[in-house]
Image: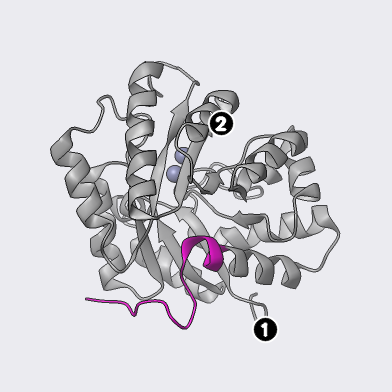
Amino acid sequence: MSEGLPALVDTHCHLVLLEERGLLGAALEGAAAAGVDEIISVGLNLDDSDRNRQIAEEHPGVYFTCGWHPHEPRVPDPRQLDALAALLHHPKAVAVGEVGLDLFFRPGYHEVPLDIQQHSFRAMLELARDAGKPVLIHDRDAHDEVLAAVSEVPGSRGIMHCFSGDAAFARRCAGIGFIASFSGIVTFPRSEGIQDSARTVADDGFVVETDSPFLSPAPQRGKPNLPERVAITAAAVARLRGVPVEEVRAATTRTAHRVLGIGTPTAAPAHG
Ligand SMILES: [Zn+2]
Ligand SMILES: [Zn+2]
């Protein structure tokens, strides 16, 4: 399926959660077969980030991030922040994330008060600034609150993961150094605003992701998602933009390399 096509990067997935479901081997083999040569495995808290580090050390092409998800019920304490900062020095640590704000409050989803989320987010934005790393932001129903928080930590830059805004919001994000990452949501019905962003964002202003094991794109919706399905999202974005899929694959890979500092001749070799 990927014969002769430019390689892809899945800029956001959770290999630890796939491993827990017994799907790590299938995820990595399927990704290789689909031309997904690089995978960013995203941390949700300190322990999860460290487990992602272990997976990244064991597999070429896998990188990891150090995160503190807005669903974390407590603000990271100084010891945890120090440990996350130390982990960020790892040669395969490429970003701080996922971090952000989530105003979609539901029993069983999350009920973390906004002020706790804001304290955690601020601490993680400062961590990224101090480490000179990009930030992977989780923004669910919190567009204005996220932009306000980011503007309080000048120098922040990175990726709006699972981009869920319209074209105007994509432009506001680009204006403060944040590109859009399109997920399988772009293939869902009733995603007109997101599809409009995918149509209009600059050629070098977006990447693609799966958020595996979540958010499987149509027609695989409802199954555990896998990194290989980033190819479905890339193809959907190409259709929306009216360009060949090769163009979207090449452009998103270039952009992912630039924003995350991977894939260049000067990138550090895989350790471990
Ligand atoms: Zn997220
Ligand atoms: Zn995620």
Secondary structure character of the magenta stretch overall = loop
| Residue 189 seen in render | no
Quarter of the image with the C terminus in it: bottom left
Secondary structure of the residue carrying tag 2 is helix
Residue 263 in the magenta stretch? The answer is yes
What residue sits right under mark 2 in the picture? 147
Distance from the alpha carbon under mark 1 to that under mark 2: 40 Å
Label 1 element class: loop
Whether 99 is among the magenta residues is no
Q: Which residue is mark 1?
A: 4
- Give coordinates of residue 72: x percent, y percent: 30, 30
Total tally of numbered discs in the picture: 2
Task: Look at the picture and state if 39 lies above or below 118.
Answer: below
Q: Position of residue 188 (x, y in %)?
A: 69, 40
Mark 1 neighbour class, 10 Å CA radius: few under 14, some 14 to 19, many 20 or more: few
User: What's under tag 1, amino acid-wise?
Assistant: Gly
Q: Indicate whether 219 appears above or below 144.
A: below
How many residues crowd mark 2 within 10 Å: few (<14), some (14–19), many (20+)? Answer: some
The residue lying toward the viewer, choosing from 233 and 249, is 249
Q: Which amino acid, mark 2?
A: Leu
Region rendered in magenta: 256-272
Q: How is the image coloured?
A: one colour
Q: Quadrant of the N terminus?
A: bottom right
Residue sitting nearer the eye, 68 or 229: 68
- Quarter of image, res 222: top right
Q: Can residue 3 be seen at all in this image of the molecule? A: yes
Residue 220 percent coordinates (x, y)? 60, 50
Q: Is mark 1 within 8 Å of ligand 2?
A: no
**In x, y percent, where is residue 26?**
40, 65
Where does ligand 2 appear, by image quarter? top left
Q: Is residue 136 left or right of residue 174?
A: left
